[in-house]
Image (cartoon, rainbow, N blue to C red):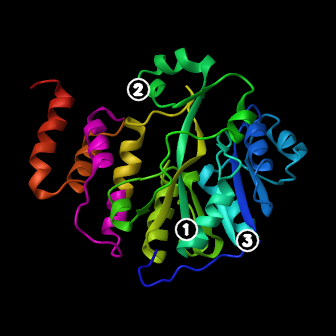
């Protein structure tokens, strides 16, 4: 929130548009829409954007009692699908939820309340990570530690109970996601934020060129325009962990580091290199990515400051060659 901005009570009747991008999501999207139908906040518009599914996702979404507007398009990727939903939204507020995640039944009410108390034009909550007990062994076999991510384990068909169950281990405290923090790397999941629709459009929407970072670019621009994003530790975004999720290291190195460099060199943001745990994590994985050697070196140079560059070059060479 802009420190000069006084908190303003938001009208309790403001419509919130929820955009659900989906691709071959028929197995899980019903649970996602169930969680929207269960929301205690009554003024919802739900838009499902099907990104060229080959299964019966459209039929499942169209038949659901939440009454979603279903938009179909050729397969152009999740960022285009999100932007298509944003363009079609009529609510004062807009938020995104992925086809396999859930929202706790009180989440929209919480977000509207947070907006009213802070006067902010973008607000967020923290997430709780859950998985099906039947997936536990498969999660272990992935080998990246994701079997340790979930704090909640459910059996088949228990999604409805999870949506209304008490959430444990949260503080109820509000922190701020500042522009400086976002320039250090992605700080939250796509679906943690609710935006004023006009703000999300003014910020350019999601970035189709930035694989797996389309929302991060949006949040950086939102923070630049409207100030820090208040985030309540409520855990009401229920993030599903499953074995088919993409890896978190090698495929992300190129998109993330190149996007960060583009943001920094584009002439709007501070030009100094910003570091942080996320950047360090990806720099460490750069040598094992699918990028060419020249691409890896270029990103390493662009993503490190003068004082740390030699150390990172040595780390990169060690990982590339295995010689210490």
Percent from the top left, x then y, of residue 280?
26, 45
Label 3, on which residue?
12
Q: CA distance from mark 3 to mark 1?
A: 16 Å
Which of the 4 image quarters holds residue 61? top right
Q: Nearer the viewer, residue 291 or 284?
A: 284
Q: Is the C-beta separation of discs 3 and 1 under 8 Å?
A: no
What span is colored magenta in the figure? 260-289
Report the side of 247 relative to 193 (left or right). left
| Figure label count | 3
Percent from the top left, x then y, of residue 164?
71, 41
The 10 Å Cα crowd at callout 3, few under 14, some 14 to 19, many 20 or more, is: few
Q: Tell me which label, 1 or 2, sits earlier in the chain.
A: 1
Q: Tell me which label, 2 or 3, sits earlier in the chain.
A: 3
Percent from the top left, x then y, of residue 174?
46, 60
Q: Tell me which label, 3 or 1, sits earlier in the chain.
A: 3
The 10 Å Cα crowd at callout 1, few under 14, some 14 to 19, many 20 or more, is: many
Residue at x-position 54% and y-position 36%: 129
* Magenta span dominant secondary structure: helix
Q: The residue tagged with tag 3: helix, strand or loop?
A: loop
Report the side of 182 relative to 275 (left or right). right
Q: Nearer the viewer, residue 219 or 165?
A: 165
Q: CA distance from mark 1 to mark 2?
A: 32 Å
Indicate which label's residue lies in the foreground, 2 or 3. 3
Is residue 321 magenta-colored?
Answer: no
Label 1, on which residue?
122
Label 2, on which residue?
144
Report the side of 39 relative to 102 (left or right). right
Asked whether residue 209 is in view, the answer is no
Residue at x-position 55% and y-position 18%: 136
Q: Nearer the viewer, residue 52 or 285?
A: 285
């Amino acid at each position: 929130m802009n420190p000069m901005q006084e908190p303003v009570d938001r009208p309790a009747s403001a419509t919130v548009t929820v955009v659900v991008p989906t691709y071959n999501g028929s197995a899980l999207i019903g649970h996602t829409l169930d969680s929207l139908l269960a929301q205690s906040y009554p003024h919802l518009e739900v838009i499902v954007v099907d990104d060229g599914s080959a299964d019966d996702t459209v039929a499942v979404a169209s038949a659901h009692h939440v009454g979603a507007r279903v938009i179909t398009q050729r397969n152009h990727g999740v960022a285009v699908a999100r932007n298509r939903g944003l363009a079609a939204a009529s609510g004062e507020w807009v938020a995104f939820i992925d086809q396999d995640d859930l929202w706790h039944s009180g989440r929209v009410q919480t977000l509207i309340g947070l907006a009213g108390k802070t006067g902010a034009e973008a607000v967020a909550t923290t997430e709780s990570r859950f998985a099906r007990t039947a997936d536990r062994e498969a999660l272990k076999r992935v080998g990246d530690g994701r079997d340790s991510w979930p704090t909640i384990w459910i059996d088949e068909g228990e999604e409805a109970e999870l949506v209304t169950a008490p959430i444990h281990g949260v503080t109820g405290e509000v922190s701020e996601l500042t522009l400086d923090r976002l320039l250090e790397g992605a700080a939250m999941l796509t679906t943690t934020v609710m935006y004023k629709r006009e703000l999300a459009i003014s910020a350019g929407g999601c970035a189709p060129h930035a694989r797996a970072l389309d929302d991060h670019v949006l949040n950086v621009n939102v923070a630049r325009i409207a100030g820090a994003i208040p985030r309540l530790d409520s855990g009401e975004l229920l993030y599903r962990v499953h074995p088919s999720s993409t890896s978190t290291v090698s495929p992300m190195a190129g998109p993330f580091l190149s996007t960060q460099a583009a943001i920094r060199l584009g002439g709007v943001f501070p030009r100094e290199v910003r570091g942080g745990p996320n950047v360090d994590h990806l720099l460490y994985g750069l040598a094992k990515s699918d990028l060419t050697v020249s691409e890896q070196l270029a990103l390493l140079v662009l993503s490190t400051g003068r004082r740390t560059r030699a150390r990172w070059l040595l780390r990169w060479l060690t990982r590339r060659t295995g010689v210490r």
